[in-house]
Image (cartoon, rainbow, N blue to C red):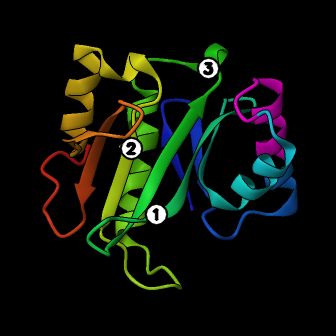
Amino acid sequence: MTMRFHDYRLENVYLRATEAQRREAMALWQAEGVVPDAAERERRSDEVVLMARTPLGELAGLSSVAIVDAADGRRFYHYRMFIKPSARIPYLMCAVTRRSRDLLQAFSHPSGPLAGLIVVAENPKLMRPGTRRELQRIGFAPWGLAPAGEAVWGIEFGNPITHSN
């Protein structure tokens, strides 16, 4: 399934990425210095949800998720995203996050249902007031701090999402 955001294509590849798409994701992370460890790049390439492509078809960025267990026993998607600096057009990050959220909320995961989506804000820019407002518009709420002090934001899939643009 392919969606559009302006001239960008957003390709849903969750749990069905081809070997070529996985190699593209690993090459992007390596070239941009995002995931320096080769084994970690390989592992994460199986977790890609959306691939964002420029009008020329170049990989501009992607979202990925890992499954994590909460203290209360529920399982959540741990959401990550990276957009190349040269491709960071206004609201592309929001579009990728919204589309990823919608796909994951509707997805029947083979290992069983997941309770929602969490983001650990490792990038301090994510805590700027404008970005915080955008996260809230997408449906995230602040959930506290991770052990290393990063802000944790979450969406519970059982709760209605009021802004689905």
* Front: mark 2 or 3: 2
First in sequence, mark 2 or 1: give its number: 1
Q: Name above or below for residue 31 compared with residue 115.
A: above
**Magenta part of the protein: which range?**
24-35
Amino acid carrying mark 1 in the image: Val
Q: Are the residues tagged 3 and 1 within 8 Å (C-beta)?
A: no
Residue 142 picture location, percent across and down: 19, 39
Q: Which residue is mark 2?
A: 119
Nearer-N-terminus badge (3/1): 1
Quadrant assignment for the N terminus: bottom right
Left or right of 46? Residue 8 is left
Disc 2, disc 3: CB below 8 Å?
no
C-alpha separation, residue under disc 2 versus residue under disc 3 = 22 Å
For the residues marked 3 and 1, what is the alpha-carbon distance in whole angstroms? 29 Å
* Residue topped by disc 3: 87
Q: Residue at x 38, y 40 (%)?
A: 147
Extreme residue toward the front, this view: 147
Q: Quadrant location of the C terminus?
A: top left
- Residue 41 horizontal side relative to residue 85, left or right: right
Q: In percent of the image, x 83 and y 51: which residue is there?
A: 39
Q: Is residue 31 magenta?
A: yes
Residue at position x 37%, y 31% in the image: 150
Report the Cα–Cα distance between label 2 and label 1. Answer: 11 Å
* Secondary element at image label 3: helix
Q: Amino acid at mark 3?
A: Ala
Amino acid on which disc 2 is placed: Val
Q: Nearer the viewer, residue 56 or 42?
A: 42
Q: Closer to us: mark 2 or mark 1? A: 1
Judging by the rendered image, the residue that carries numbered circle 1 is 68
For residue 102, which quarter of the picture? Answer: bottom left
Classed neighbour count for the residue bearing mark 1: other residues with Cα under 10 Å, few (<14), some (14–19), many (≥20): some
